[in-house]
Image (spheres, rainbow, N blue to C red):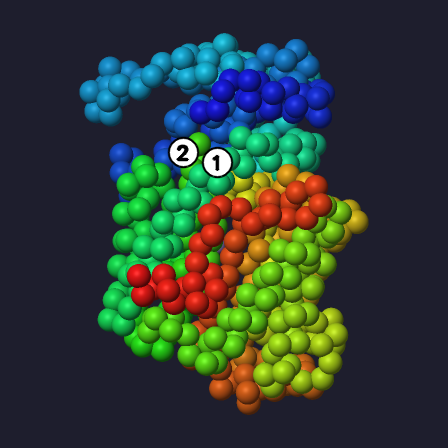
Amino acid sequence: MFAENIYIARRRALRERLRTGIALLPGNVDAPINFAHNVHPFRQDATFRYFFGINRPGLVALLDLESGEDVVFGDDATLDDEIWLGKTPSLASECERAGCRTVRGYAALQAALDAARRDARKLHFLPPYRAATTLEIGRLMGVAPQEVAKCASTALIDALVALREVKGAEEIEQIEAALVVTDEMHRAAMRAVRPGAREREGVARMHAVLAQHGVLEAYQSVFTKRGEILHNFNYDGRLAPGELVVNDSGATSAFGYASDITRTLPVSGRFDTRQRELYTLLLEAQDIGIRGSRPGVRYADVHRAVVTHLAGGMLQMGIFKGSVSDIVSSGAYAVVFPHGLGHQLGLDVHDMESYGEDRVGYDVQTPRSTQFGLRSLRMGKPLKAGMVLTVEPGIYFIEALIERWAAERRHEGLIDYATLRACVGLGGMRVEDEIEITATGARVMGPPIPKTVSEIEAAMAD
Ligand code: GLY
Ligand code: MN
Ligand code: MN
């Protein structure tokens, strides 16, 4: 946990933004896999952890935004818990470390909420992303489960986005620490990739690094030679010469902050000519994204600058035809890059997206596009100093998409389908780093993780 003054200051900052009512902030409970006592590794709710730092299940906080009283409701371990699960610190001692001195048993929560409702106090809560939380808020508030998300407080969401999207020095330090572990993970994977190896082996090497550091992965790794399948969580493949592996994986820090790094690796240890040409273009595009990010610039415009470079390069390769501006404005480029340039990152790898992507990544001046490809950009609004974002362009040859568009003759004046079809089989490639927006630009975070053609080939030969 951070020092208590960090949590006290965060709760005070929320009260300064949201001056009336009570914030109801549930932590997470254990999530069973197939029966109650066989559970997923515990992951605390990021909002609860932001305000209290406590990483244990079964807690709910009420922050009185008028009186300033913060109460955590939860129960200490019973004798049975101690017998089966071991001793845990008292809840009061953990709350004290977060600067909160009022702790009540979980059973007192209902009465506190009933009293608030009797006094006609506004109760702010967030849209839940887990069924257990939906049911519990519904039960506590007397609202049908299907109505809970609709009753969520947009004022609370907006206040939290404003607070959490500007990272403090202590948060930057945590993300940097996560990236140190992620660097080790990716280097271990680079050494494991070779013809005949299983994808699962690369993942296992990265898990060994996580275990050595005593932390969890920030999200389920993508480690695949079918990198054109964007969220491919299958690790059954065996690697063959000439293939590319997309490794998108990151560690959490000790205090729960994420990292999110992607590297693309040639199984043979060397990129072939066509892979090198495309990968070099991709690196240039990412560099344009990094150099174009600064306070006041809309991330949608950074996305546009990146895809303009990709379109120009692929026009020269004969994959596109016509003019770069038409390829970009029509959305034809999305046939090879159907996702967005990046997203915010913090305690969540897609930071705060449980509040609703549009409330985090867009604002009234920046509406979300409905165009295929651009609509998947999760963050389009202007950048601010202190934000942390990913910059993650990719190039993918997705047979189903190419064939659908070819059959529809979509953008046929802009896409050379014969040349594009010849690339099917090459798979996909992506490069992803974290940047911190500074007063004047952007800084790539973490240690340098091999990224250029020569750096990757050297790390794989190591
Ligand atoms: N690893 C998830 C993402 O890059 O967004
Ligand atoms: Mn990402
Ligand atoms: Mn990623």
* x and y percentages locating residue 215 in the rendered image: 35, 38
Q: Please, is residue 78 above or below residue 420 in the view?
A: above
- If you read the primary sequence from the N terminus, does the residue marked by circle 2 or circle 1 appear first? 1
Q: Quadrant of the N terminus?
A: top left
* Res 126 quadrant in image: top right
The residue under the point 73% across, 80% down is 323
- In the displayed orientation, state which residue is furthest to the right: 365
Q: Please, is residue 41 above or below residue 391 in the view?
A: above
* x and y percentages locating residue 86 in the rendered image: 24, 22
Left or right, 164 with respect to 45, comes to: right
The alpha-carbon separation of the residues under discs 2 and 1 comes to 8 Å
Q: Tell me the amino acid under the disc marked 2.
A: Ala
- In the displayed orientation, state which residue is furthest to the bottom: 418
* x and y percentages locating residue 222 in the rendered image: 40, 58
Q: Which residue is mark 2?
A: 254
2 and 1 marks in contact (CB < 8 Å)? yes
Marker disc for residue 174: 1
